[in-house]
Image (cartoon, rainbow, N blue to C red):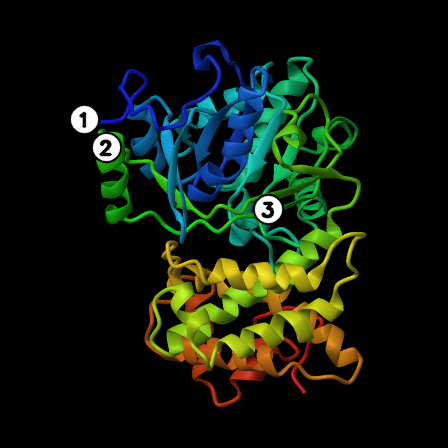
Amino acid sequence: MRLASQTPLPASIQTPGYDRAAQAAGIVHIGIGAFHRAHQAVYTDDAMAAGDRDWGIVGVSLRSADVAAQLNPQDGLYTVSTRSAAGSELRLIGAVQHVLVASETPQAVVDAIAAPTTHIVSFTVTEKGYLRRADGSLDLAAAVGAASLYHFAAAGLAARKAGGLGGLTLLSCDNLAGNGAVLRRLMREYLAAHHSDLSAWFDSECRCPATMIDRIVPATTDADRGAVEATLGARDEGAVVTEAFSQWVIEDDFAGPRPRWEKVGAELVADVARYETAKLRMLNGAHSALAYIGLGKGHEFVHQAIADPEIRPVIERLMRKEAAPTIDAAPGQDLAAYADALLDRFANPALNHRLIQIAMDGSQKIPQRWLETLAWHRVRGQRCRSLETAIAAWIAFLRSGHPIDDPLADKLREAAADPNAIERLFGDGGLIASDWRPA
């Protein structure tokens, strides 16, 4: 039996605390993968349960129809399994109403963005989905494609302007430094090239707040789905698994209405930057290091790698001695306690977070996760032994024969094979643009 609205569920399963049928869709989310379903959709589900109305989510997949095939036959419903050493809790999420596949129904995506009830368009498209060139500018040739977030956002905004509707909040939920400012700048570049008549309207009517997102969400396996089915009594093809920890820090700068996410655990702040920097350099930086060093030593999961007595000291030094000193902590932001908590989260034995999943898209992640820290120390005449170890492990990974899931895969493989791989990757004119240059 497949999960659906009328499926009888065990009394132990938490279900949506609101009438789903009475909610209009207020959010269009582009990139409706597992992370969004375990993070922003949960906050939105909680906000509607707390009394907010009309914040249902229309999900959009730019390319793959997989999530639509998982959720649409289930009326948008899916479960979130929260796992820790103490056990697992299962809840049903009702915030997602349906999923559109942009490659199949492009006009439906534009119509959803242009709908009068829509106030927010949010994104989890990964770093590579922003289609930036090495210098950070928009790759205009790639951005005109039908799988581009800019194509759909601009078309939807144009329809809103033509219909006399107000602008939108465009909310990046990806691991980019200054993600709101980056999104605004890239949208402006796209509009200047393809919708110049929208540029002034976009500037005055739309907002792009910065965000920091934090929750570990491994890829769901068949074993995970089987465990959910055993508890639920129904098959959930859209099931996601995650940890108990969740954090969402959002710049309070919206173009119009929004859910009261701050009532259900999110933090609305004037400046996200210091939270974001800590997360990118400490959590994400450590994660990428664990991935490449751990894979090199034959580990499969994060909890195995952090338990390795040769790897753990490298990760601790990376977080405490290399990344933390570069961060101007916000009032009350305890970086030592943050490092302690991260080590505990990495060690969670109930969360099989695959290292190969974290190893994806290294060329897009490494600049903000590692190189900004290295550049900070280099200016001060200091070296970062842990990050240097991580870079060596990344190059070894590129040479190892592992599949390389990265938009620069062929160029990375070629550069890594060169005896001067460091220069080919990070030197002047190298593949990876940053302020750091190897000594």
Spatial CA distance of label 2 from label 3 is 29 Å
Which residue is the site of mark 3? 213
* Among numbered discs 1 and 3, the one appearing first in the sequence: 1
Image quarter in which the C terminus is found: bottom right
Spatial CA distance of label 2 from label 1 is 6 Å
Above or below, 306 against 99 in this view is below
Spatial CA distance of label 1 from label 3 is 34 Å
The residue under label 1 is which amino acid type? Answer: Met
Left or right of 231: which side holds 272?
Answer: right
Question: Residue drawn 73% across and 26% down?
Answer: 255
* Among numbered discs 2 and 1, the one appearing first in the sequence: 1
Which residue is the site of mark 2? 235
Which residue is the site of mark 1? 1
Q: Position of residue 392 (x, y in %)?
A: 51, 82
Q: Is label 2 in contact with label 1 (beta carbons under 8 Å)? A: yes
Whether residue 146 is visible, yes or no, is: no
- Residue 195, quarter of picture: top right
